[in-house]
Amino acid sequence: MQNLKISVVTVVFNAQNTIEKCLGSVARQKFNNIEHIVIDGGSTDNTVHIIKKYSNSVHVFVSEPDEGIYDAMNKGIKLATGDIIGTLNADDYLANDEVLNDIAAAFASQETDVLYGDLDFIDPDGNIVRKWRSGAYKYGKFNWGWMPPHPTFYCKRTLFERLGGYRLDYGSAADYELMLRFLHANKMSVFYLQKVIVKMYIGGVSNKNLINRVKALRFDLKAMRNNDILFPFITVVYKPLRKIMQFF
């Protein structure tokens, strides 16, 4: 298991209030073979200063303008040398110090291409406000609006080489489109790790206002049409409805 190397890509821009919790959660991992790559978009607050405090656990640091979160993720993926790659955004943190141990063990024992787990949405005080429990994957679930939590999505680096990275032309749905492409359109093998992997602070650009929400739905529909979803206009309705159960 320790022969596996996991690359964690963190993208950040002006996140001085949350980046330290994110970096610390990686630095405290008990799994030893980690490559932490941090791609900063040219922050103007205290973010870069905080990142430099973690020079012992941040192995690659780039700070330069980019074309947004998914462009930054692609930069990090291209720099990654790990067998497995996952992303951890500046507003997220690993749920405990065994997360990467658990992920490595699952990849070693299950011979899978992709892994995902569970996620908790939390408020600024750390209280859980939503629980994302996707359950085990079965081919066809994407047709019913299902998707795994992207911050818990880890896959073999070779998949990015074969199937490509995040498509910027899908806007806020670039992560959804990539998971659709990998799991649904290309039928990569997948394992569900039934544990909370990531804690995520509530919010999100695509949900800030009605205009952004409409744009997000259009990008979702485009992703569905181009990745073999059977009935995209039905699926695009089911997808947001699934979030309701996360509050219970």
Image (tube, grey):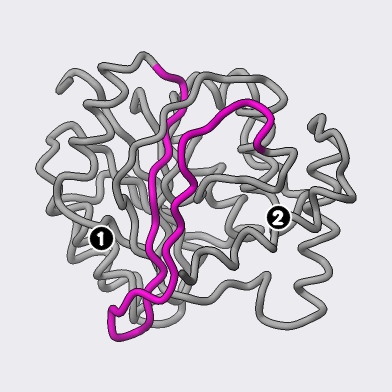
Viewer-nearest of labels 1 and 2? 2
Q: Quadrant of residue 172?
A: bottom right
198 lies above or below 87: below
Q: Quadrant of residue 83?
A: top left
Q: Position of residue 121 (x, y in %)?
A: 41, 69
**Compared with residue 70, is residue 64 higher up or lower down, i.e. above or below?**
below
Q: Tag on residue 231? A: none
Of residues 245 and 174, the one nearer the viewer is 245
164 over 48 or under it: above or below: above
Q: For the N terminus, which image quadrant? A: top left
Q: How many marks?
A: 2
Residue 29 at x, y = what percent? 15, 47
The numbered mark at residue 239 is 2
Which residue was labeled with disc 1? 23
Q: Horizontal placement of 118 versus 145: left or right?
A: left
Crowd tier of the residue under label 1, counting other residues whose Cα lies within 10 Å: few below 14, some 14–19, many 20 or above: many
Q: Which contiguous range is marked in magenta?
A: 112-141
First along the sequence among labels 1 and 2: 1
Q: Is residue 115 magenta?
A: yes
